[in-house]
Image: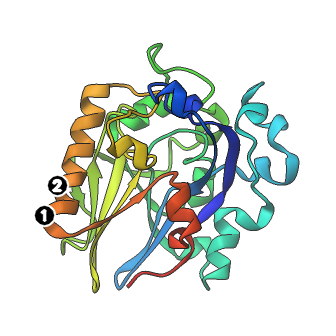
Amino acid sequence: MSSGTLGPFSIRVLIPSFPEDQDRDITIPIMMAVIDHPKGLVVYDSGNNIAVSDGGCKSYWAEGMCDLLQPSQTRADVIDMQLKKLGYKISDVKAYVMSHAHLDHAGNLKMFENAIIFAQQDEIYQARWQAPFQAGPAFVDADHAGTNAFNWAPLNGDYDVFGDGSVVVMDTRGHTLGTSSVYVKLKSGPLVVAGDAIWMEENLEGYPAGLNFSVQQYFASIDRLKLIRDLQGAELVMGHSANQYSSGLYNKWIR
């Protein structure tokens, strides 16, 4: 699913190393995913906070972020309404995977207080106390305030959610201290919801996303995901690919 779009802005805003002579404006989607497993419903990320919808951005995000990112999110794009369109309710969600704590991924975390919340331990730490080397307006304290008592499942690496190899939270850190992707074994073959481990195709070509905690770990995670793609034939669903969005990949069932 998509929680609306961000942009347009220069691709170099997101990928500073991208060649200046190839600069172009891009508009990118905000990816979220629902995994319907026989043992329970899983949601991966929750997009921008509900307050950002329908022009409410400046009342919630830090000064300057709304003008820079230009979110298009409407109320219908928010995760609870997206679930409703698919025939589900927030209360149906058994597990929520927080890919990382940035504003366009963990915005509606508070809606999932009754779910088991999977996140890397380092990312939980980062969400609640932004160390100076990663602090900045990409983290919104209000997204995470009051969630300490939620049913957290802190991870230190990969985790098989249902114990059958069908849904595995993967440690793909590098973009942040504890970025996570999800490996899903479908009838049609394996799929990896990469999230911000891979923003878009240019990252696969060797241009790192901005805001990275560690470029070295970032590319190590990309290399790991590329191996799964190449050896297992897995499809990689990227966090902000305009090409995948326009193809309809962000708004369809894959079985």
- 253 vs 157, left or right, is right
Graded by Cα atoms within 10 Å as few (under 14), some (14 to 19) or many (20 or more), the crowding at tag 2 reads few
Give the label on residue 231, or none: 1
Q: Nearer the viewer, residue 131 or 16?
A: 16
Amino acid found under the numbered disc labelled 2: Leu
Secondary structure state at the residue bearing disc 2: helix
Return the residue nearer the eye: 80 or 115: 80
Quick check: can you spot residue 227? yes
Residue lying at 30% horizontally and 34% vertically, measured from the top left:
218
**Residue 104, how many percent across, how many down?**
60, 45
Q: Is residue 46 above or below residue 24?
A: below
The reply to whether callout 1 and callout 2 are in contact (CB within 8 Å) is yes
Residue 113 can be seen, yes or no: no
Residue 140, above or below 240? above
According to the picture, the residue beneath numbered tag 2 turns out to be: 227
Residue found at the far front of this picture: 21
Q: Position of residue 65 (x, y in %)?
A: 72, 30
Is 36 drawn above or below residue 59 in the view shown? below
Q: Tell me residue 98's x, y (percent).
A: 45, 50
Q: For residue 169, which numbered disc appears in the image?
A: none
Q: How far across and down, in percent of the image, does residue 1 sit?
A: 57, 67
Q: Residue at x 19, y 48 (%)?
A: 224
